[in-house]
C-alpha cells in the first residue's frame, strides 16, 4: 500500500467512508549465484520470476560484519551486482538465439525482430544492452522478455552510521550507477520500525536521523524509474488513488477504473489537487471556476482529481 498524504487530505475533505491507497507489488526473489543462467542454484526459477516484473531492485550488502557471511566470503557490492547482471545477460543471449531460430516460421513481427537483432548486436559487441530502453517503448521490450533492459534500482543495505555519511561501498555504487538509481536503507532499522505501533514510528524515524523509511524511498524510486504518476477519484462513499504512466490520456485513465468508462467516455471533470484543497472540495472548486472539462486526449497530471462522464 503506497503512502500518500494527499489521499488522506482529499478523503477528509470529501468525508469519504472508505479510503483506498494505490498499491505496488514487490516480489522477493532469492539472489543469483554464478552459473544461474545454466540452472545453478535457484537460477531457472529466479529467471522465470524476474521476467514478469516491470523493474528490478538489486538489494546489495554494503556493510562489514563478522556475524554475517555471504557466498563470496567478502563484501563487494559491485561484484555481487555484476554476477546477477551477467547471468541475466547470458539468459537473454540464450532467449534471443532461440527466438531468432524459431523465426524461420515468421513468428515475429518487424519490431520484435529489430529489437532481437539489436540486442544480439549489443551483446556481441560489448555495448550496454540497456541503451535499447532509450530507443524502444518499454512495453515492446517487455513483450520480448529481455531481462537486461528492465529499469533497475540499486538498494545499498548499510549499517546505521552509514545512513548519515555514505561508506565507501555506497560511494562505489553511486559512482558506477548514478545517484538517481541508488538508495540507502538500513535493514536493521527497518525491522525495528516495523515492530513498532504506527503511532510510535514517526518519533522513532526522527530519532534515527532518517527522513523516511527505506520502503518509502523504494516506492518513490520505483515511481520515478517506471515514470508513473497518481490521480484521485473521490466521493462521500470512497476516495481512491490510481497509478498511471506519465503522459497517460484521460480515456486510458478512465479505462483503469472500468472498461465502460473508456468505451463510453464523454468528458473528464478535472480539478487540481491544490484547488481541491484550497476550496475544500468539489462544489466550491466548481463554483469558483476551477473545474475544467477535458476530452479523451487530455494528458492527466500527477495529483489531479478526476470525475468521468460516460454513457453506456
Image: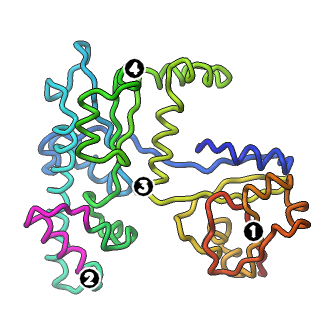
Residue underneath mark 1:
270
Q: Earlier in the sequence, mark 2 or mark 4?
A: 2
Few, some or many C-alpha atoms within 10 Å of disc 1 (few <14, some 14-19, many ≥20)? Answer: many
Numbered label tally: 4
115 inside magenta stretch? yes
Disc 2 to disc 3, how far (Cα)?
32 Å
- Dot 1: element: strand
Q: Position of residue 274 (x, y in %)?
A: 74, 55
Q: Earlier in the sequence, mark 3 or mark 1?
A: 3
Dominant secondary structure, magenta: helix
Q: Is residue 97 visible?
A: no
Q: Earlier in the sequence, mark 4 or mark 1?
A: 4
Residue underneath mark 3:
225
Residue span colored magenta: 113-131
Q: Earlier in the sequence, mark 1 or mark 2?
A: 2
- Report the side of 116 relative to 152 (left or right): left
Residue 2: give its label.
Answer: none
Q: Give the farthest residue toward the top.
A: 66
Q: Please identify the quarter of the rendering in which residue 5 is found.
A: top right
Disc 4 to disc 1, how far (Cα)?
44 Å
Q: Nearer the viewer, mark 1 or mark 2?
A: 1
Residue underneath mark 2:
107
Residue underneath mark 4:
160
Q: Nearer the viewer, mark 2 or mark 4?
A: 4
- Report the side of 96 relative to 235 (left or right): left
Amino acid at each position: 500500500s503506497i503512502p500518500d498524504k494527499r489521499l488522506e487530505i482529499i478523503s477528509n475533505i470529501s468525508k469519504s467512508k472508505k479510503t483506498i491507497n494505490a498499491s505496488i507489488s514487490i516480489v522477493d526473489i532469492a539472489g543469483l549465484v554464478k552459473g544461474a543462467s545454466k540452472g545453478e542454484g535457484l537460477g531457472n526459477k529466479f529467471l522465470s520470476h524476474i521476467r514478469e516484473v516491470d523493474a528490478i531492485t538489486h538489494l546489495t550488502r554494503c556493510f562489514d560484519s563478522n556475524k554475517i557471511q555471504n557466498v563470496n566470503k567478502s563484501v563487494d557490492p559491485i561484484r555481487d551486482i555484476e554476477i546477477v547482471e551477467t547471468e541475466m545477460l547470458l539468459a537473454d543471449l540464450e532467449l534471443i538465439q532461440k527466438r531468432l531460430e524459431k523465426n524461420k516460421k515468421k513468428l515475429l513481427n518487424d519490431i520484435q525482430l529489430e529489437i532481437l537483432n539489436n540486442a544480439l548486436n549489443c551483446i556481441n559487441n560489448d555495448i550496454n544492452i540497456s541503451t535499447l530502453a532509450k530507443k524502444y517503448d518499454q512495453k515492446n521490450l517487455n513483450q520480448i522478455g529481455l531481462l537486461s533492459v528492465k529499469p533497475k534500482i540499486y538498494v545499498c543495505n548499510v549499517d546505521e552510521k552509514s545512513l548519515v555519511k555514505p561508506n565507501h561501498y555506497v560511494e562505489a555504487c553511486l559512482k558506477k550507477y548514478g545517484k538517481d538509481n541508488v538508495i540507502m536503507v538500513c535493514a536493521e532499522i527497518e525491522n525495528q520500525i516495523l515492530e513498532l505501533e504506527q503511532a510510535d514510528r514517526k518519533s522513532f524515524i526522527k530519532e534515527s536521523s532518517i527522513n523516511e523509511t527505506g520502503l518509502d524511498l523504494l516506492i518513490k524510486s520505483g515511481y520515478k524509474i517506471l515514470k508513473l504518476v497518481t490521480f484521485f477519484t473521490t466521493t462521500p462513499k470512497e476516495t481512491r488513488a490510481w497509478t498511471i504512466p506519465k503522459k497517460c490520456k484521460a480515456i486510458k485513465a478512465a479505462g483503469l477504473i472500468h472498461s465502460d468508462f473508456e468505451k463510453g467516455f464523454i468528458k473528464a471533470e478535472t480539478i487540481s489537487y491544490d484547488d481541491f484543497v484550497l476550496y475544500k472540495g468539489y462544489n466550491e472548486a466548481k463554483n469558483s471556476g476551477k473545474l475544467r472539462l477535458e476530452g479523451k486526449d487530455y494528458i492527466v497530471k500527477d495529483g489531479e482529481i478526476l470525475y468521468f462522464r460516460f454513457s453506456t
